[in-house]
Image: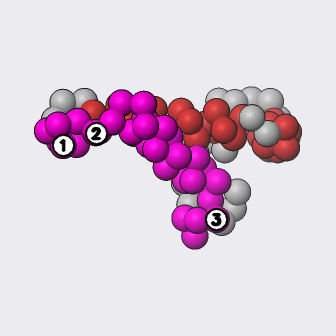
Amino acid sequence: PYALNFDVIAHEVGHAILFSLFGTPAGGLTQGDFGPFHEASSDLVSLLSFLNFDSGMDRLLRHCDGNLLVLNELNRIAELTGDR
């Protein structure tokens, strides 16, 4: 199911973008804030990728009636559920 989930693919592309820009750290992924920075940045790539599509925005606003504080696709980015 991961290969069929756009959020997950966009997230992984976010990792690829960061690796292409900054390379891999000499000490591996366990030092400092490299891992959390990568995850947060990749989540942002996934979020912005979703917002790029008019169909995604329309569906988002329709499902939450314009109230982005309720449970919606933006705050569930990259979850693998069947009810989206």
Give the number of marks: 3
The spot of residue 35 in percent (x, y) is 29, 38
Q: Judge the density around disc 1: few (<14), some (14-19), many (≥20) Cα neighbours within 10 Å.
A: few
- Above or below 7: residue 58: above
Q: Nearer the viewer, residue 72 or 48?
A: 48
Q: Along the line of sight, which residue is nearer the eye, 43 or 19?
A: 19
Residue matched to label 1:
28
Seen from the viewer's position, the closer of residues 15 and 60 is 15
- Magenta stretch bounds: 1-30
Residue type at mark 3: give it: Leu
Q: Would you name the residue on which mark 3 appears? A: 4
Name the residue at 72% across, 34% down: 51
Residue, x 33% and y 36% (percent of image)?
23
Instruction: Using the image, tell me which numbered label, if any, was put on residue 24.
Output: 2
* Marks 3 and 2, the one that precedes in the sequence: 3
Hey, which quadrant is residue 60 in on the image? top right
